Amino acid sequence: MDALLAPVAELLGPAWLPVWTLVKIVVIVLPLLIAVAYLTYAERKIIGWMQVRMGPSRVGFFGFSLWGLGQPIADAVKLMTKEIIIPSGSSKFLFLLAPVLAIAPAMAAWAVVPFTDTLVLANVDASLLFVMAITSMGVYGIVLAGWASNSKYAMMGALRSAAQIVSYEIAMGFALVGVLMSSQSLNLVDIVQAQQGGFWQWYWLPLLPMFLVYLIAGVAETNRAPFDVAEGESEIVAGFHIEYSGMAFALFFLAEYANMILIAALTSIMFLGGWLSPIPGCRTASSGWRRR
Amino acid sequence: MDFASVVFYFLAAILLLSALRVITAKNPVHAAMALVLAFFTAAGIWLLLEAEFLAITLVLVYVGAVMVLFLFVVMMLDINLEELRRGFWDYLPFAGLVAGLMIVEMIMILGGTNFGLTAPEPKPADFSNTKELGRLLYTDYVYAFELAAVILLVAMVAAIALTLRRRPNRKIVDPAWQVKQKRADRVYLVNLKSQKPEAKSEEDE
């Protein structure tokens, strides 16, 4: 791999590092966005079956109906071409800033998430703290969206959602204290490596109560059922993003699902041994990577 | 100028501008957001000074929690800015005093070499700020640290005790009680014989 890249690096000179980092970022973010699209596909397909809706289980490409695999693409195209309506009496700058503030932290946190012991964009020392700090910024998008919309429903939704996120963040942070005490590190790569030794050595067993607290707080943090009181479809319609349309709405949607995937990834890193094999001594992905 | 100073001046410029926006912004929500930006940029400058634990904690605590609550309060209030701005210049002497104190503090720190202060040695690259802070807090300063923690706990309990309100007149039905009810306890049938309506009396007409 390195031998292949060396001539390109020479060609670009000092511009090589930013270019190579950008390539890495795209390699992380692109699958993330595709995963978001197809997670909604899974969810919508099941709901579609339950409600006898035609779209999600049939939309395909060029006349082929591929189990509805075309639905997320169709959704994306629809959302991108829709008009972004700005409500009257709203604070326009903050109204447009809010979705950006929601998605930026959800994406930025992925910078330190390790995929194997060498495959990580930025292996920084206090990466666990970084993730917690960055994800705590996400609540601004929600609060501002609710306030800037100049709508009572959006305001109520934003207050509910923000109160829930801020309070469960504390439970989540303290559940992680157990992890960083037993691994004696704030570095996510080191935390995974401290769990070496197979399925029974992973932190889910010694820290079982913490694991459960983290799991529940994680569900609450992402405002999913049964903690979806922030959405409150029957009383406040949809919560903070009720006034958003088109791509601005899609950004909130992307942020929500990217946060869900992030929480899931962090759970597996912190409690379920990350990339380590459940059977000790077995060839893992990371050892195979190094040998090549 | 090396890259570190470029980053420093960039962050410093944003910090000053956003701090200025905090006091000049017309809308209090905009002011609160400018303060968030100021905190975030200050964290960036601290990262540049290799104080990574403090920088991340600043973002985690102030940006992630304290400012959200600020924003909550500011959003809910209907602030009349004209009224607030009326006495703006009356605060000048007090503000001048605070600013003067800050200048004195800055001179003492920045001109420390003149008073015999020495700058600490730069640390090696693998020096972990977080670990060192934790070691100091739990060994040398453990009593002060625990005392601060207890004071915070007392404040927290007090805040909850002050705002906790019991409402005795809530109309909530206990589901367990509801399920326990039997038909026999509440309904009884009366065998009522059919009877003729009473003959109309003539006074009614």
Image (cartoon, grey):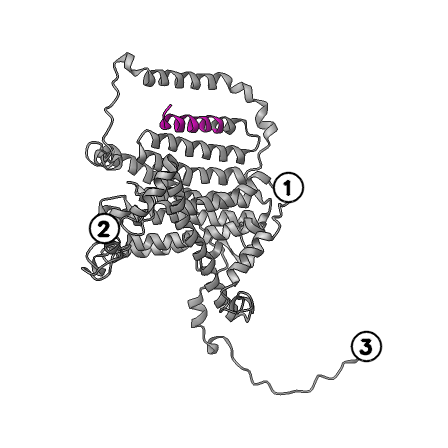
Q: Residue B112: horizontal and vertical position, in percent?
A: 30, 16
Q: Which residue is mark 3?
A: B205
Tell me the subunit letter for badge 1.
Answer: A
Image side of residue B61 versus residue A202, left or right:
right
| Coordinates of residue A42 in the picture (x, y in percent) | 46, 64
Nearest the viewer among A148 and A290 is A290
* Distance (Cα) linking label 3 and label 2: 100 Å
Residue A292, x across and y down, in percent? 25, 53
| Residue B17 painted magenta | yes
On residue A193, which mark appears? 2
Mark 3 against mark 2, which lies toward the viewer?
Answer: 2
Q: CA distance from mark 1 to mark 2?
A: 53 Å
Q: Quadrant of the C terminus of chain B?
A: bottom right
What residue range appears in magenta?
A: B1-18
Identify the secondary structure beneath mark 3: loop
Amino acid type shown at disc 1 = Gly
Q: Residues within 10 Å of mark 1 (few under 14, many from 20)?
A: few
Decide which of A225, A80 is in the foreground and name it: A80
Residue A105 appears in the picture as rendered: yes
Q: Up-down: is A70 above or below A189?
A: below
- Which chain does tag 2 point to? A
Q: Chain of mark 3?
A: B
Which class describes the residues within 10 Å of circle 2: few (<14), some (14-19), or many (20+)? some
Q: Residue furthest right?
A: B205
**Does the magenta run of residues contain A46?**
no
Callout 2 amino acid: Gln
Cα separation between marks 1 and 3: 69 Å
Q: Is there one chain holding both mark 3 and mark 2?
A: no
Asked if residue A284 lies left or right of residue A138, the reply is left
Q: Which residue is mark 1?
A: A89
